[in-house]
Image (spheres, helix red, strand yellow):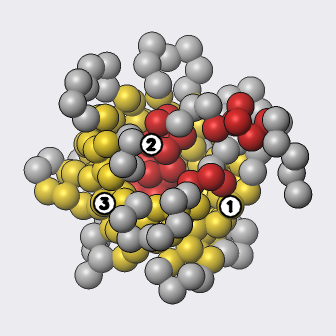
Amino acid sequence: MTTRYKIRQNLISIGDDFWIENEEGVKVYKVDGKVLRIRKTLVFEDAQGKKLAQIQQRLLAIRDTMVIDDADGKEIAVIKKALISPLRDRWTVKVKGGEDLDVTGNIFDFEYSIKQGKVKVAEISKKWFRLTDTYGVEIDAGQNHILILAVAVAVDMMSHPDKKKEKKGKDKK
């Protein structure tokens, strides 16, 4: 059985908090954008505020790199954008103590698949929602939901690095 989550794309920027909802619209995970840090940091929490994981941009990397840490600050995965991917966008996810993941898709259509070897374990898509700024993450049974959601958010951030600049000039309401 798969589980589907909803993420509002325009909310993913450093300094902002946002919720990840399940397909019934229930707020399941809060993502806290930390502003007072040198590098981009997002902290994933459950609905009660317990820290589950965090994503941080790795500074001084040759190519776009983000690190996912568990609640105790131990690195669980490293996401890197592929150097050359002429037809599709591609990222590799090196998972500590587990099988690595590959993310491939189309940045313009926001359609991605996450594979473990040759097996698809999750899909990221805008096609399930009418709102243009919303996308879904569908995760197969037996997968680490926080890891997959963190990968989806990190891919979104690395695909759209100018989001923070766009939001800076807008007034917050």
Q: Would you identify the image quadrant in which residue 126 lies? A: bottom left
Q: CA distance from mark 3 to mark 1?
A: 21 Å
Q: Nearer the viewer, residue 13 or 62?
A: 13
In the rendered image, the residue lying farthest to the bottom is 24
Residue of label 3: 123
| Residue 157 position within the rendered picture, expressed as x and y whole percent measured from the top left | 54, 40
Q: Amino acid at mark 1?
A: Phe
| Residue 141 position within the rendered picture, expressed as x and y whole percent measured from the top left | 28, 74
What residue is shown at x 53% (from left), y 66% (from top)? 131
Q: Which of the marked residues, 2 or 1, is nearer the chain's N terminus?
A: 1
Q: Which of the marked residues, 3 or 2, is nearer the chain's N terminus?
A: 3
Residue 18, disc: 1
In the figure, 146 relative to 12: above or below?
below
Q: CA distance from mark 2 to mark 1?
A: 16 Å
Q: CA distance from mark 3 to mark 2?
A: 12 Å
Q: Nearer the viewer, residue 99 or 2?
A: 2
Q: Is residue 99 left or right of residue 126?
A: left
Label tally: 3
Residue of label 2: 155
Q: Nearer the viewer, residue 152 or 48?
A: 152
What residue is shown at x 82% (from left), y 42% (from top)? 170
What residue is shown at x 59% (from left), y 20% (from top)? 59
Please indicate, yes or no, whether residue 88 appears anywhere in the rendered image: yes
Quick one: SS at disc 2? Answer: helix
In the figure, 90 relative to 30: above or below?
above
In the rendered image, the residue lying farthest to the left is 118
Please indicate, yes or no, whether residue 96 appears anywhere in the rendered image: no
| Residue 26 position within the rendered picture, expressed as x and y whole percent measured from the top left | 59, 83
Q: Is residue 22 left or right of residue 83?
A: right
Quarter containing the N terminus: bottom left
Quarter containing the C terminus: bottom right
Q: Amino acid at mark 2?
A: Val
